[in-house]
Amino acid sequence: MASLRLIGVFLKINLQIALAYRADTVVNILINFMWLGWELLGLSIIFSNTDTLGGWGPGELIALLGVFRLVNMIMAAVIWPATEKFNASVRDGSLDYTLLQPVNSLFLVSFSRIVVWRIWDLILAVSLIIIGIQMSGGAPSPFNIVIFLLLVISGALVIYSLWIVLVALTFWFVKFDNNVTILQALMDSGRYPVTVYPPWLRLIVTYLIPIAVATTVPLQGLRGDLSNWQVLVFVGIGLGAFWTATRVWKAGVRQYSGASS
Amino acid sequence: MLRIYRRLWQVTWAEQWQYRANLLMYLLYWLVSPVIYLAVWTTIANSRGSVSGLTANDFVTYYMTLLIVDQLTSDITLHVFAYKILDGTLSGELLRPVHPILTNTLMYNIAFKALTFMVLIPIWLVLYLLFQPDYSMVTFQSVLLSIPAIILGYGISFMLGAALTCLAFWTTRIYSIMEFYFAVTTLFSGQFVPLQLMPPVIQQAARFLPFQYFIYFPIQIILGRLPIETILWNFGYGLVWLVVAYAIFRRVWREGLKRFSAVGA
């Protein structure tokens, strides 16, 4: 698998970059911890005033926080750093070098820059999910766990596809620096179950900028709230979105003409 | 002096006007979290009638007012000045016979506020229609009283922000410090929840810290929730904090400037 080997190489390079700034890595992890404490305090304030939020108990919200952090971790570790580099490379023409490589250009753009210390965040997120499920008392069946994983992957795929489309717009509108701000801005809505939002906001974060598909929906799958039929639809949406996004990306690359030539 | 400020106003306004689209994006970014907390707390209040005596409408008016107050009292000195210390471009500004932070950066801040406020108004009206807050408790008098409170709040926030920015003379990790400061202010200013819902320890601490002047205090005045004695006492205490913050800033600035070696100059 050439692409797996490439990811290994990327990880190694980025690990070396991170090791050059060890103190920064420590500070970043500490700050990350501080935010976790902050988020848990927020949840404790909410649940000192109520027993359920939108039909969800404290354990379930901690698990949701874990899923949110998981998705957020993927964005912060891989997607946001790639965006900055990509936007600049379209403007100054250095994308030429990426396109010349004998590897899928989308793959190179997405994964060549990885913020390694975020792996720590992955451990935290998974622990939160496990602790949250324990707290809510239900031991989910293996079948529901499989559905949960399937929905996390397809949800992440939906957001990744949306990101591809948004950054690909840079091929047409070169000075479109803010292409992903809307995605970043609405990210925070993933901390809480989508059922607490007023209808118009629910519509936006479910269909327009589908953060909820990657956060609320997987947990609903884990709780067994979704029928098999609904799970299939969500997985289908994930695959369909990715297929569409790769089409847009290819059209964009054809549109790209370099800056120097 | 006034002429300097007027001229700087023109320059900074023109400068910011170029980035209108960025402003809209910034606003969008900054709007989301209050709207989320508004939704979360009104859901809770609706399901139980009230939370610690606060009804759903109390939460709607709180967060809707917060959108305006936070915009007016927040400070961007760290974002627009710290890098000048780090990359050495500050040396150019030091040649001018005016204080770089107290003139140029202050005006830049105010121009930024004026512009974002213009964009905020239509968005706020849309949210007003969506959430339908009942603002009947707001009186002309309370709005009038909130103006000095907001100016005081901004004064403290600007001075503390400026003092913190000057730490860039000592460390390059200024953005980590900024994130920490952001978390602290969010907690103690009432940005996250109305302070009376916080655990008692945090409430006690918030009463003595300066951060409630950024958000909680002006909002409570506008919504007419404070008796006049409390308001007066708070104004007095806030003025003390303003003086303290100014003194801290002066000290840090002077000491920091001695260490400044103008990288790259």
Image (cartoon, rainbow, N blue to C red):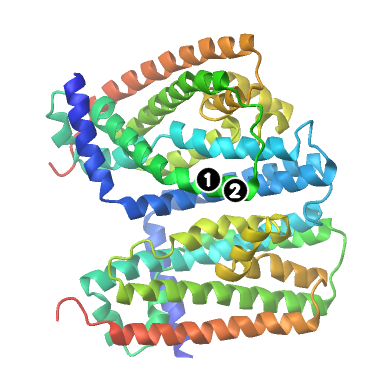
Q: Position of residue A42 (x, y in %)?
A: 68, 43
Q: Position of residue A195 (x, y in %)?
A: 73, 59
Q: Is the residue marked by circle 1 packed among few (<14), some (14-19), or many (20+) residues within 10 Å?
A: few
Q: Amino acid at mark 1?
A: Leu
State the residue at coordinates (33%, 23%): B252
* Residue A85 seen in the current view: yes
Which residue is label 2 attached to?
B129
State the residue at coordinates (56%, 36%): B66
Q: Position of residue A19 (x, y in %)?
A: 41, 59
State the residue at coordinates (46%, 68%): A79
Q: Which residue is at the front of the view, B142 or A97?
A: B142
Q: In the image, which disc is placed on residue B125? A: 1
Q: In the image, which disc is placed on residue A250? A: none
* Residue A112 seen in the current view: no
Q: Is residue B96 above or below residue A41?
A: above
Mark 1 and mark 2: Cα distance apart in space:
6 Å
Q: Amino acid at mark 2?
A: Leu
State the residue at coordinates (52%, 10%): B236
Q: Is residue A165 above or below residue B137?
A: below
Q: Are marks 1 and 2 in contact (CB under 8 Å)?
A: yes
Q: Position of residue A147 (x, y in %)?
A: 75, 78
Q: Please state the total of marks drawn on the protein image.
A: 2
Q: Is residue B194 above or below residue A6?
A: above
